[in-house]
Amino acid sequence: MKITDLLRKDGIALGVDAADQNAAIDKLIELHSKVGNLKDAEEFKKAILAREEKGSTAVGMGIAVPHGKSAAVATAGVTAMTIPAGIDYKSLDGNPSKLFFMIAAPDTAADTHLEVLSKLMTLLMDQSFSQKLIDAKTADEFLAIIDSKEAAKDAEEAQKKAAAAAPAAPAAPSIRKLVGVTACPTGIAHTFMAAEALELKAKEMGIDIKVEKDGSGGAKDVLTAAEIADADAVIVAADKNIEMGRFDGKKVIIASTKEAIHGPEDLIKKAQTGDVAVYHHTGAVTKSETTSNESAGRKAYKHLMNGVSHMLPFVIGGGILIAIAFLLDDYSIDPSNFGSNTPVAAWFKSIGGAAFGFMLPILAGFIAQSIADRPGLAVGFVGGYLASTGATFASPGGDVPSAFLGALVAGFVGGYIVLGLRKVCEVLPPALEGIKPVLIYPLIGTLLIGLVMCLINPVVGALNAWISGVLTGMSNGSIIILGALLGAMMATDMGGPLNKAAYAFGLASLANQNETGYMIMAAIMVGGMVPPIAIALATIFFKKKFTAAERKSGPVNFIMGLSFITEGAIPYAAADPLHVIPSLLVGSGVAGALSMAFKCTLMAPHGGIFVFPVVGNVAMYLVALLVGSAVGCLLLGILKKNAQEA
């Protein structure tokens, strides 16, 4: 299959005048629709925008390669466009983008098109080729330039295969052979361009290199154990997790695909100097984060989310079972033992309590595991357990639980304790390498986290008690304001840091297992349910405010909102943030305030309408949801301008 089998004449637009990135995306999608590649243009655009959120697909040198894999794609294909004046596409090198290829890949197992697409990516690394395409006057000329370059590339590849059996040419004296791995989140564009950049530069420098491409259709040119063992160094240029255990004991350079595309010579020269750290992997072959340019705040956020995501199943399952226990129990038998008065209720509460009890150890354990890999898990898990029991030096069995905040501290401290132990243990003889992860790290790490938790539990426990007291002692007016604030935070960035901060606060409150904590969790969930429902209502009652495509997908937001999936509102907010976000923020704030005013409670941190049977004061909770959604819908109708159909 040739590149021009996927790129048709009708899918090429030359000399386009586009105002910005969004206009360029719309034009390229329009070309895909024109040639029949798409089943649903709006859904495909969501896939394109989701990829752009992970990092710009403008790879520099005036080239942008937006791409998406979606069920909305009927047939794999490529569209192309030139904008001679250039536009700001948030390019990796900061320069305007002039040449665009948009790749549409179907969300199926069929991936025969990927080889062709990877070839296109490698051809674009030749700047003279790219410039010829930008200067092309007709679609026929554009296709002819591609055909000519592809034929030359195929001939070069055939020559490479023919020479593969011949003895390798002498390499640079400092290194004999390199291997590498490239990977980007979608595995279509940056993966292959980074690999091509490394291969071209290595060839130019007279160095033998083999690069594994971790593409969306699976890994290509997979490195064998023998090739890895034979290599002098490894270059890992990846923007996602890849398998790192196989490189244990090798000199490994870790970089991003951006660094490989724009600075392959720097990476290879670094390998040549030999001043490269030896990679040591502990435990079994696992995935290891290879991104090297993240801020400290972003890394801390990812560690926290790793703990929260692993903790949620325990909290949700346990919380719902405990709530069922209260539903089935008889309060009049013994108010002080409510939830366990009857055998059936006691059974549900016992099982739910067991699941709920894992909440803090799991949170701390997986935060530590995110920081220090598998050796951090045991240390963090123990720290989380000690936070839940409240161990102190005076009372090792438990005295002052530090709860959620203590578990957060335990997770981060436990992870960095293990990293510190790794550093200290580097001076040990190689013969002791095998006992580090099974003896030294867990033994000393557990001892140290025990000392830390016994030291901080009284302090953090007192802070928790103060916070709990403040929340419990809030007046009706204050608690309503808190509900409004938390509800509004859920709608501010819908899945972003503010949304997650509010949700994390809800989980911390839920861990206290008191009525105030349950009220806070209820306000947070109803605040998160409002945005998609308000959007869905507005597409029905204020049709002129939305495009035909937006109206078509609007009702889906009813399902997403009722399922507590706030992210359903994101495409609408992204399209008109100045009018949509304030409307949804107010609606969610109203819902959160009403939930607090009605003293609604929720013991499960997720589930939407499916956990309404265990909501305290469910009738008024439904009222809070309906009123908040109606307010959001009405404000959308007032603030949004009429849509301009394409």
Image (tube, rainbow, N blue to C red):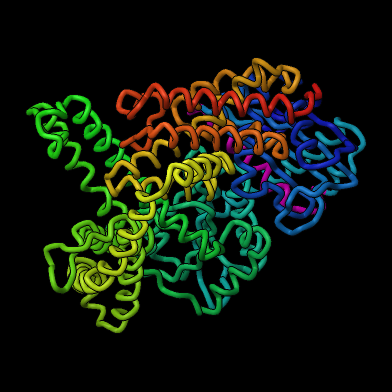
Q: Seen from this angle, which residue lies furthest left?
A: 343
Q: In which quarter of the image is residue 334?
A: top left
Residue drawn at the location 32% of the way across and 45% of the way down: 510
Q: Quadrant of residue 551?
A: top right
Residue 646 appears in the picture as rendered: no
Relative to 283, is 70 above or below? above
Residue 360 in percent (x, y) is at 27, 53
Residue 252 appears in the picture as rendered: yes
Residue 426 lies left or right of residue 330; in this view the side is right
Residue drawn at the location 80% of the way across and 34% of the way down: 143
Q: In which quarter of the image is the N terminus?
A: top right
Question: Magenta part mainly helix, strand or loop?
Answer: helix
Residue 638 in percent (x, y) is at 73, 27
Residue 390 in percent (x, y) is at 20, 62
Q: In which quarter of the image is the C terminus?
A: top right
Residue 482 in percent (x, y) is at 48, 45
Q: Which is more toward the observer, 428 or 557?
A: 557
Q: Which is more toward the observer, 17 or 379?
A: 379
Residue 151 lies left or right of residue 68; in this view the side is right
Q: Which is more toward the observer, 223 or 278?
A: 278
Q: Does the magenta stretch include residue 360?
A: no
Residue drawn at the location 31% of the way across and 72% of the way down: 417
Residue 412 lies left or right of residue 221; in this view the side is left
- Report the span colored magenta: 108-130
How many numbered marks appear? Answer: 0
Residue drawn at the location 83% of the way across and 42% of the way down: 133
Q: Does the magenta stretch include residue 113?
A: yes
Relative to 403, is 47 above or below? above
